[in-house]
Image: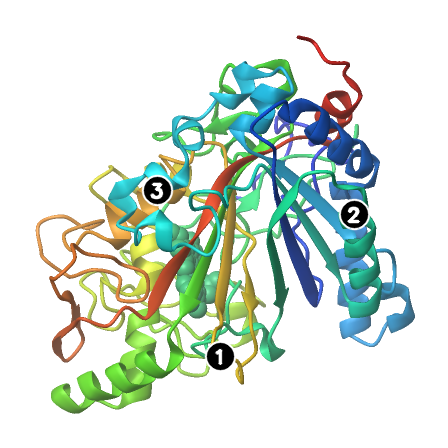
Amino acid sequence: MNPDPTGEPRLDLDDIQAHILPGFGHQHQRFLGWRLPDDDPAPAARALLATIAGRITPARHGLANRAIRKAVRHGLADPAQLTEPPAMAAALSPRTLRALGHPDLATIDEAVAVGMARRSYLRDPPSGTWAVGGPGKEIDILVILAGDDSELLAEATAEVCATATCELVHDQQAHRLPGDVEHFGFRDGISQPVLRGVVDDVGTALVTRTPMPLMPDHRAYAAPGDVLVWPGQFIFGLPRQSETAPARPAPARDMPALARNGSLLVYRKLEQDVAGFQADTARMAAELGTDPDALRAQLVGRWPDGRPLVGHADATRAELNHFNYDTDTPDIPDGPRGAGADPDGLRCPLAAHIRKVNPRDQETDKGPPAATLAFAILRRGITYGYPSDSERGLLFLCYQTDVTQQFELLAQRWANNPERPRQGMDNGVDLLIGRVRAGTPRRARLLDGEVSTFTDYVLPRGGAYLFTPSLSALREMALARDSR
Ligand code: HEM
């Protein structure tokens, strides 16, 4: 089946923030979080929004920048073209939305309204210990700046900070590591859902469709490994994924008009204990008589260079995401080879990180594989700290339109639960990110046996659930006079 984009909704690339679509691919990013004063927060909010509202990068610009970046990588464009002004994104807390006179936006999502610090079932350390988002350090306005030139980025940061009249409670630098690996050494950012949608009147698809045979899982793909998802899962006001019929859209949820083209941002600072991970996985490997690198790959579901455990040992770049778990994927003529199925986790453990957070064509406790598409997230994370730093980790960011049913479902219902997403067997937790009750070991069934540990390789250090408005909504909020 070659999915035809006719009937897919138009995406407004001038109104959607580029950080949502396609994300910032820049080398450096800076995360600035301000907290509004308790007394009379509106003027400070409006002053900061007035500074940034006209400077937020639209999706159209982000897509053009991504094309240039690709051309530079292939030696087809001059790297000087990348030294443009830094890209910018902004997201707001429910408190800011209320202060600006939009209580309806402040309550569009229950998890966002309640706040990350009160979602105890994530099993985060107490928010009093958090580096960001704990008492007195709550982010009301988050601004993300991104650039390839660190000096231009520092200048843009100073400019924004100079105009803010409220307290800067969070200032976090982040940098991509060579090869786009995260700090445990694994390549990240390989698998992402692809948005359905067209970008002009003649029906040009946002992402070009490659003719493909019907996949055994009956889901539609833009290209091998690039599964298509209706854009309302990530952007408000657009058709969403149906949990039973993936090719047909479910209507957009009823939302206040100002939510249109906006999204919900999960921002989490996740510290990585690299020495602890290396030592503890070496111990487990010795106990099982396994090679330590093979054991680490089993925790992720991929080798450090991105090759999936269920795929070919010599998988090419085009083959990194063309695989499923319950069914064989076909060879694509003149394209990637297919991979054999692994329904029972004999090549990739059922507890492996990528298998926990995206079981692909596997039936889950939530229903048939079509349902899993509705839990997809758009990941926009970036590493912080360098290998020589004592403190380093991942700034985990993702977009969705329902935090409970997307990010929290993956983190809490699946990664933290030993008997899910596949039911009927205790396969253990996701040993990368899974969290269990204090005082109990984290366990997982790997290929050569069960392992158990009291070491947390990833330590949540706080964050925020925020609303990311469209460019037009942000302008409207900045310009509106005090409505009280
Ligand atoms: C420090 C913490 C984390 C590390 C080191 C990490 C690492 C990785 C790596 C190496 C991959 C494979 C690359 C890829 O398939 O794109 C991956 C994939 C993924 N991760 Fe994480 N991750 C972390 C936290 C999280 C969290 C908190 C979530 C959400 C609950 C998450 C969700 C995902 C998803 C959805 C995928 C793609 C799976 C697929 O589609 O096959 N990750 N992660």
- In the figure, residue 283 lies in which quadrant? bottom left
Q: Callout 2: few (<14), some (14-19), or many (20+) C-alpha neighbours within 10 Å?
A: some
Q: What's the CA distance linking mark 3 and mark 2?
A: 32 Å
Mark 2 vs mark 1: give the one in front: 2
Instruction: Tell me the amino acid under the disc marked 1.
Output: Asp
Instruction: Tell me the amino acid under the disc marked 3.
Output: Glu
**Where residue 422 sits in the image (x, y, percent)?**
19, 50
Q: What's the CA distance linking mark 3 and mark 1?
A: 28 Å
Residue at image coords 39%, 32%: 111
Q: Earlier in the sequence, mark 2 or mark 1?
A: 2
- In the figure, residue 141 lies in which quadrant? top right
| Residue position for label 1 | 305
**Where residue 336 sits in the image (x, y, percent)?**
52, 68
Nearer to me, 185 or 131? 131
Q: What's the CA distance linking mark 2 and mark 1?
A: 38 Å
Residue at image coords 40%, 36%: 374
In the rendered structure, find residue 132 and report the number of the disc placed on it: none
Q: Earlier in the sequence, mark 3 or mark 1?
A: 1
Instruction: Tell me the amino acid under the disc marked 2.
Output: Val
| Residue position for label 3 | 408
Q: Callout 3: few (<14), some (14-19), or many (20+) C-alpha neighbours within 10 Å?
A: some
| Residue position for label 2 | 160
Q: Callout 1: few (<14), some (14-19), or many (20+) C-alpha neighbours within 10 Å?
A: some
